[in-house]
Image (cartoon, helix red, strand yellow):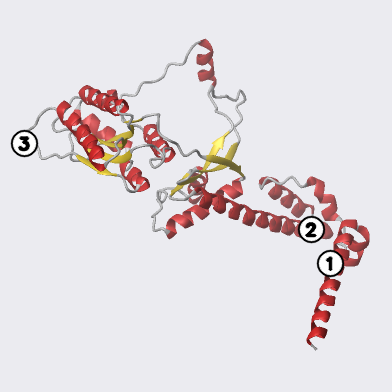
Amino acid sequence: MKSYHLSPEKPKAKHAFKSNDNHASVFVRREGHIITAEHRASMGAGKAKRKTSRLPHSAAKLTTFRKNARLIDLNKTPGTPYFFTLKPLNDIEPGHLNKVLIGLTRLLRTACAEYIYIQEWAKHEKTPHVHLVANIPGDTIAEVEAFAERVIRYWLKEMPKNTSTRIKQDARPVYDAIELFGYMSKGTPDEFNDRAIATGKDWSVINVTGRSRGWEESKFIVTEVSREIGLEVKREMKRVSSSRGVKLSKRPKGCDDETKRTISEVSPFTISGLSRTESARLLAQVIDNQLQKERQFLIEMRDLYRQAHERGSQEVKGEIERLLLNKGYDMHHMFSKWEAPQMNRSERYNADPIFKRVCNALKVVKAARTKSLVSVSSMRE
């Protein structure tokens, strides 16, 4: 159940990194949801009425398909993965297409074949076609091919007859699931909806995408990270994608630099084909590098603050304090130490017991090493 903020304050955004056996992603999530006063009042009066859309496709449905495709594991699920492209032979009513699709999924469930599908509407078509991936049961190649032929026969049986058509159905084994799911989701909701509206029919009755519930899933591990680490992980993932020859989409030229930076910061980024081990190694490497950068940054701020204090420049000290707060560092407890005069090594040795112990330990190690070198040289002589 969603928790809503009663205050008008904007919920805090948090960066997160998630990965499974094949995918890694960086995204921004918020600690709740903001609703308007009018919406809250309507919820208090009764269940809020949903606005029904007459459009068949949407960005949310495409996102749902992509999330499901990244979650399911074709190799761990029983059966042989097969890819079908099923096309209507003639002009068809939306209700009949939906009825045929329901019957097809019932056929697959009866045979314990897991499935996932999405519909696409090509530019030259009068009706949408179906891209379907199903893990077909069967112990032999002949049994698998026979079931695939059964799926196509059912589709042709339920379609309106058209003897003059050259449209052919397609069924083939799946060899590269990541590339295949990318191909299946290439169509945009706007293109689909424009072609649906042009027919003058109500295509909102069809289910654009769906999946069965019996798939073996590759669960995501989610790690909350700081803003700096999240942005650095995204940059590193983009470098990996570029090294693989993937062309990254660019922001529209009409956006100014600040808008591009803001959109890039909050936009999720996913890379496919990265194993769980490789994802964990990438995150660990970025965290180590980021911690080193943060330490170096704090050292530089300390030195600048100390120099400003020695010059008596309150303005510079105030700017450094604001910069630290903007970066998420509350260093008020350290300012008094930063203002203290910097001690030399001898003064620190007498004032800091921990530093004194470290220096004494280093002396012992150095003496033992020198003694060892002398012994080896005397033996050679």
Q: Quadrant of the N terminus?
A: top right
Residue 90 horizontal side relative to residue 128, left or right: left
Assess whether mark 2 and mark 3 are in contact (beta carbons under 8 angstroms): no
Judging depth in this view, the residue of 151 and 248 nearest the camera is 151
| Rendered location of residue 20, percent (x, y) | 49, 43
Other residues around mark 3 within 10 Å, as few (<14) / some (14–19) / many (≥20): few
Tell me the mark number nearer the camera, choosing from 3 and 2: 3
Question: Which badge, 3 or 2, comes first in the chain's sequence?
Answer: 3
Determine the secondary structure under disc 1.
helix
Q: In which quarter of the image is residue 83?
A: top left
Given the image, on which type of amino acid does mark 2 rest? Ala
Q: Name above or below for residue 219 compared with residue 38.
A: below
Determine the secondary structure under disc 3.
loop
* Cα distance between the residues tagged 1 and 2: 34 Å
| Rendered location of residue 117, percent (x, y) | 31, 34
Residue linked to disc 1: 362
Confirm whether residue 324 shows in the render. Answer: yes
Residue linked to disc 3: 164
Given the image, on which type of amino acid does mark 1 rest? Leu
Q: Furthest-left residue in view?
A: 164
Given the image, on which type of amino acid does mark 3 rest? Ser
* Cα distance between the residues tagged 1 and 3: 90 Å
The disc placed on residue 308 is 2
